[in-house]
Amino acid sequence: MPAATEPRSIQECGCKGIRTCLICEAQCHRDPPWQRSLQKPYHFLYCPDTGWAVGAEDSDYEGWAFPFPGVTVIEDFVTPEEEIEMVRLMDRDPWKLSQSGRRKQDYGPKVNFRKQKLKMAGFQGLPSFSQKVVQRMGLYPGLEDFQPVEQCNLDYNPERGSAIDPHIDDAWLWGERLVSLNLLSATVVSMSHDAPDSLLLCSAPYIGPDAFAGSIETPSRSVPCQKVEVAISIPCRSLLVLAGPARHQWTHAIHRRHIKARRICSTFRELSEEFLPGGKQQELGYQLLQVALTFQGRPI
């Protein structure tokens, strides 16, 4: 089984620029990232039952909350047996070294986001083992018309110090929804927004049969947006959907401390309006979808 090559790959590093992992930090005596950048002082936890971000226990903002739209977490999206089989099939193909201790497999067109150009050469579609997963997505509210044109598998390992920096995915090619399948272990997605504004806080909404029936009060406190981090707990085998403000305004990241065991994240991306019917590049978008949905792809 190809996963047996993991120990050798742990000794290799794909970091560039300011990004680091445990391997290059040890080899080059570099400081870990949390010693070079300020951490957000105010922590909130996303509550899937209410759609609000709630102040962490024993913090200055315990009991306070603000709406956090655009996040959907679907638990047990795949079965343990399906998870095992998907990972087995992924590990049959090579993993490429990536930044910050990650490895990756890409199923999609080659894209230069800075120049806004792409090439279809070598793109043969999404992998066959994702066909049932994509079909199942269409059974859930908000994903009925979701048609991914790209899949990126990222492999995280605590022995490499894997992480991913705060970022917002490109919006020239990729569309409104980012859909990620979390495999092998649970993790936390950390959201932040470096806007100069303040977030208005209310008392945390009540969860129960009478939730929201007069339980939300007028905002009476605020917190600087730049100092806030919202943690979204992502169980193993769950599906995370980011849309709206969570997709376009808030950055998302995976901190090193939240990788406790090997984790694979498969992120599926759809086309932006520019590549959909009526858009300037609708013909190219049509070609991309036709290839993607053959489900005959190999990593590029």
Image (tube, rainbow, N blue to C red):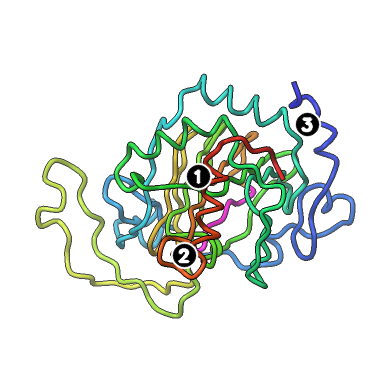
Q: Helix, strand or loop at disc 1?
A: strand
Query: On residue 6, which mark appears?
Result: 3
Measuring from the top left, give residue 191's x and y in whole percent.
48, 59
Q: Helix, strand or loop at disc 3?
A: helix
Q: Marks 2/1: CA distance?
A: 16 Å
Choose mark 3 or mark 1, whichever is in front: 1
Query: On residue 180, which mark appears?
Result: 1
Q: Please determine whether, in this image, residue 220 is positioned above or below residue 90.
A: below
The structure residue drawn at horizontal position 68% and vertical position 43%, both measured from the top left corner, is 105
- Closer to the camera, 60 or 86? 86
Q: Please determine whether, in this image, residue 256 is positioned above or below residue 279.
A: above
Q: Marks 2/3: CA distance?
A: 33 Å
Q: Is residue 252 magenta?
A: yes
* Number of other residues with Cα within 10 Å of mark 2, as a class: few under 14, some 14 to 19, many 20 or more: many
Q: What segment carries the magenta color?
A: 249-256
Measuring from the top left, give residue 261's x and y in whole percent.
63, 34
Query: Could you tell whether 175 is left or right of 106 in the image?
Result: left
The structure residue drawn at horizontal position 38% and vertical position 52%, both measured from the top left corner, is 71
Measuring from the top left, give residue 145's x and y in whole percent.
36, 47
The structure residue drawn at horizontal position 66% and vertical position 31%, both measured from the top left corner, is 90
Choose mark 2 or mark 1, whichever is in front: 1
Q: Is residue 17 magenta?
A: no
The structure residue drawn at horizontal position 48% and vertical position 32%, both measured from the top left corner, is 237
Measuring from the top left, give residue 125's x and y in whole percent.
60, 42
Residue 77 figure quarter: top left
Type of amino acid under label 2: Trp
Query: On residue 250, which mark appears?
Result: 2
Question: Reading the chain from its start, which is encountered first: label 2 or label 3?
Answer: 3
Type of amino acid under label 3: Glu
Query: Could you tell whether 185 is left or right of 97 in the image?
Result: left
- Quick one: quadrant of the C terminus? top right
